[in-house]
Amino acid sequence: MHHFAYRNGVLHAEAVNLAAVAEKVGTPFYCYSTATIERHYRVFAEAFARARAGELKDQGGAGRVFVYRFDHPGAGPELGATHTSEVPLVFGTWRDNGPGERLGGQDDRARDVAPKVAGTWGRFLHGEAPEWAPFGAGSDEVGVFGGGAPLHVARLTANSIPI
């Protein structure tokens, strides 16, 4: 599934009329759909989590895979939540007036999200489960750091997450 569709004979990307864009910027041009990219990521992430849990069970393990998503826009409004932007919150460097702050601490909510991320990672390293269920075996829970709350539980399944 993707978010490109014809409406009244005109191709749209999400709600954007691509004929109007082509008229304004010329052709050819590249058009990406955030909703499509996010959905395809979720499909991949779900498949990976299920496969990894199955591998662990096949190897005689518990098959416990915990999935989290990092929605905290720590790198500022231009970049949003970027790869590894949770690391400064884990290690407490999000206020270092340097790279840690540029990566993870440019949003005022970092002071609320940082203890949730650091605490969850710390407890997990010491053998404790996070605040959400392991993925698979009937659960599609994912921990979400940032966004609407410092930490909340959502569902990962690509078809169940509104985009």
Image (cartoon, rainbow, N blue to C red):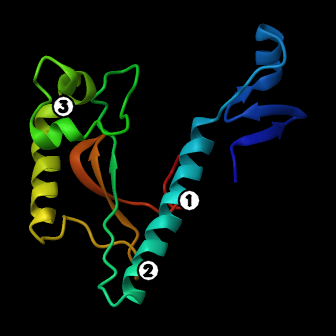
Is residue 10 at all visible to an observer of this figure? yes
At label 3, which amino acid type do we have?
Arg
Disc 1 crowd, CA 10 A, few/some/many (<14, 14-19, 20+): some
Question: Mark 2: which amino acid?
Answer: Glu
Nearer to us: label 3 or label 2 = 2
Q: Amino acid at mark 1?
A: Val
Mark with earlier residue (3, 2): 2
Q: Residue at x 44, y 60 (%)?
A: 156
Does residue 123 sit above or below 148 in this rendering?
below
In which image quadrant can residue 23 be found? top right
Mark linked to residue 115: none
Q: Nearer the viewer, mark 2 or mark 1?
A: 2
Above or below: residue 159 compared with residue 11? below
- Visible residue check, residue 113: no
What residue is disc 2 on? 55
Residue 147 is situated, as x and y percent measured from the top left of the image, at 31, 40
The quadrant of the image that shows the N terminus is bottom right
Q: Residue at x 83, y 38 (%)?
A: 6
Q: CA distance from mark 3 to mark 1?
A: 29 Å
Which residue is under mark 3? 109
> Residue 113's spot in the image, x, y percent?
17, 41
In this view, 111 is above or below 159:
above
